[in-house]
Image (tube, rainbow, N blue to C red):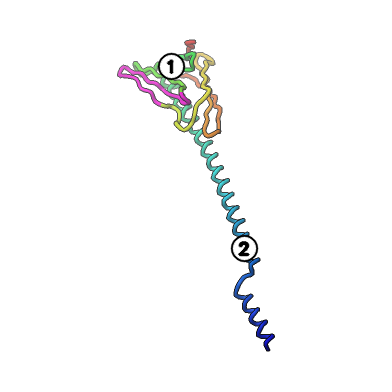
Amino acid sequence: MARSGLSLSVRCRRQRGYLLQELLLGLLLAVVLVTLVFKATGTAGRSFGRLQDELQLQEARRHILAQLEKTVCYDAQSVSLQADGKISCRMLEGGKQVTVYSDKQGVYQRTRTNKGTGVNPVSLEEVGVFRWQVRRCSPQMLCVSFSLYRNGRSLRVTQYFICYSARITDDA
């Protein structure tokens, strides 16, 4: 009887708790799962950052080219290219002179009227603009090229503009 009572108490103990090996195995699996979740989250975060950088570069490209197209192609009466890469436009609106140029990793538009002068950024602040080049292809076609940089990512842009109401001249 003593023997059956001993085996009964051992059996009850085993049913109530876990072995140390089982606890360690469960802890190891939990650590592996947490590590995999953190690694996936970090990878997803880096991918999202890269995607956001690419979108910013594309948005900066679109914004610069849209502003240049409006100024040079539609609103300019005459366009002259300067040796330092500046684009000077005399506008159809009376007495308005617009100069588009690259300076300090950005593209700017200086507007002069009879009432004064103002400078506005054309490029986005978060994106750097480098290697700004302007050349005349024909009396009505202009080629603008530049590079955009953000967080180690870059985008090379080359665009041809046709000036509908202006002739392009070189001041160089």
Outermost residue to the front: 2
Outermost residue to the right: 3
Quarter where residue 25 is shown: bottom right
The answer to whether 119 appears left or right of 16 in the picture is left
Q: What residue did someone put label 2 on?
A: 26
Q: Earlier in the sequence, mark 2 or mark 1?
A: 2
**Above or below, comparing residue 149 to residue 47 in the picture:** above
Query: What residue is drawn where x is 60% and y is 72%?
Result: 17
Q: Does dot 1 land on a helix, a strand or a loop? A: strand
* Residue 88: numbered disc: 1
What segment is highlighted magenta in the picture? 104-120
For the stretch drawn in magenta, the main secondary structure is strand
Query: What residue is drawn where x is 32% and y is 19%?
Result: 116
144, 24: nearer the viewer: 24
Residue type at mark 1: give it.
Ser
Residue 65 drawn in magenta:
no
Residue type at mark 2: give it.
Gly
Quarter where residue 74 is shown: top left
Residue 137 locus on image (x, y percent):
54, 16
